Image (cartoon, helix red, strand yellow):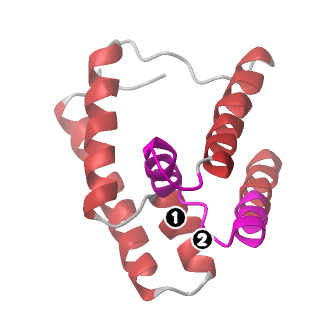
Amino acid sequence: MVRALVGGALIGAAATFYWVANGRVAGVSGVLAGALRARGDRGARVLFLAGLVSAGVVAALLGHGVPATPQGAAPVLLAGLLVGFGTRLGGGCTSGHGVCGLSRLQPRSLLATLTFLAIGVATAVLVARLAPGWRVR
């Protein structure tokens, strides 16, 4: 529980710092979209994404990485494409709406976050019932 609280506090602090330093919300899908554009301010966005990747690498080196899925890369790639499509359709990702939007009391972020959670719970229940062996352990 303490690790979750510390992690959440670090995410909130990073989102606040990014907003204060850049005047932008730290929604990862928007940061990524801006970093992929050939024009505009890309430096801060690329550094932000590098920090995300670096944090994952450091966690893995310290033995806290996420285990590989037994299903291989195909379901993960498909899931990534669906998440990318959903973030464009929903006008942002969980970090943009859930962390930044809710803290700014944005009604559309509340609706988006409730939708993310409801669909996530429904998907988990559906997968558990229809394909019980298809779980990450």
Estimate the spatial distance between the alpha carbons at disc 1 and disc 2, rounded to whole Å.
5 Å
Identify which residue is drawn at 49% across, 85% down: 106
Q: Residue 28 placed where, x, y %?
A: 53, 52
Identify which residue is drawn at 43% across, 58% down: 93
What kind of element bears circle 2?
helix
Q: Is residue 28 left or right of residue 130?
A: right
- Residue type highlighted by circle 1: Gly
Q: Can you say whether 44 is above or below 100 in the image?
A: above
Q: Is residue 101 magenta?
A: no
Q: Are marks 1 and 2 in contact (CB under 8 Å)?
A: yes
Q: Residue 133 placed where, x, y %?
A: 29, 21
Q: Is residue 125 left or right of residue 43?
A: left
Residue 80 occupies quadrant: top left
Identify which residue is drawn at 40% across, 63% down: 92
User: Is 100 in front, or is 122?
Assistant: 100
What kind of element bears circle 1?
helix
Q: Residue furthest front?
A: 39
User: Is 90 in front, or is 23?
Assistant: 23
Label 2 environment density (alpha carbons within 10 Å; few <14, some 14–19, many ≥20)? many
Residue 8 visible (yes or no) = yes
Q: Is residue 20 left or right of residue 100?
A: right
Q: Which residue is mark 1?
A: 96
Q: Which residues are magenta?
A: 14-41
Q: Residue 8 placed where, x, y %?
A: 72, 57
Residue 52 occupies quadrant: top right
Q: Which residue is mark 2?
A: 100
Main SS of residues in magenta: helix
Q: Is residue 25 magenta?
A: yes
- Residue type highlighted by circle 2: Cys
